[in-house]
Image: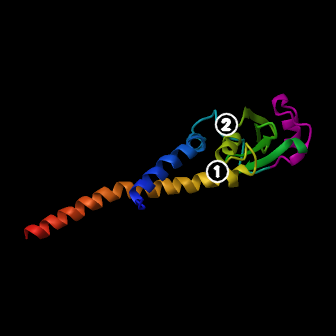
Amino acid sequence: MPFNPRVFFRRAHRWGAIVIAAPLLLVLLTGVLLQLKKELAWVQPPTKKGAGKEPTANFDAILAAVKAEPLAEVKGWGDIDRMDVRPKDGVVKVQCRNRYEVQVDFQTAKVLQVEYRRSDLIESFHDGSWFHESFKVYVFLPVAVVVIMLWATGMYLFVLPQWVKWRSRKKRERAKG
């Protein structure tokens, strides 16, 4: 049986879509949430405004303010994942290991807001690291390659009939003229 590229690409397109359906859907859904994270407080808490633009509170005062918040579950620096200093807003966003975000005014060291932050969790689903660190390379990277293959085979399957019609129309025009 001779090799037929149209049949091969159609089958590759169909099976490729089936193989990547679940991981691609996860990437697409989480991607939409991440695109909207600034608009959806459920994903990422909105940034509050502090008293001023110049930081005067020291790290010890900020840590003490965060430790006083029961939801944060912070006993020391080891319970803090990272701190995001926003001079324009006059606030320090303290992201705790338990995914709570405590926003502290960096002039008064007063807590402005304590909210659960889902964006990092959603991002770990988006890139596959939530399942295991190797998922990023051994599952989600091949899915991306198959998506590129689906695009290429889809373009081939779309363009081929157009090209055949164009070529046959040209032949008819040459035959007439």
- The residue to which callout 1 is attached is 140
Image quarter of the N terminus: bottom left
Tell me the quarter of the picture where residue 77 sits. Answer: top right
Q: Label 1 amino acid?
A: Phe
Residue 35 appears in view: no
Residue 2 in the image: state x and y as whole percent: 41, 62
Q: Which residues are magenta?
A: 56-77
Which of the two residues, 144 or 71, is positioned nearer the viewer here? 144
Residue 155 in the figure: left or right of residue 120: left
Q: Residue reaching furthest left?
A: 177
Residue 16 in the figure: left or right of residue 52: left
* Label 1 to label 2: alpha-carbon separation: 28 Å
The dot on residue 47 is: none
Residue 18 in the figure: left or right of residue 55: left
Residue 148 in the image: state x and y as whole percent: 52, 57
**Does dot 2 land on a helix, a strand or a loop?**
loop
- The residue to which callout 2 is attached is 45
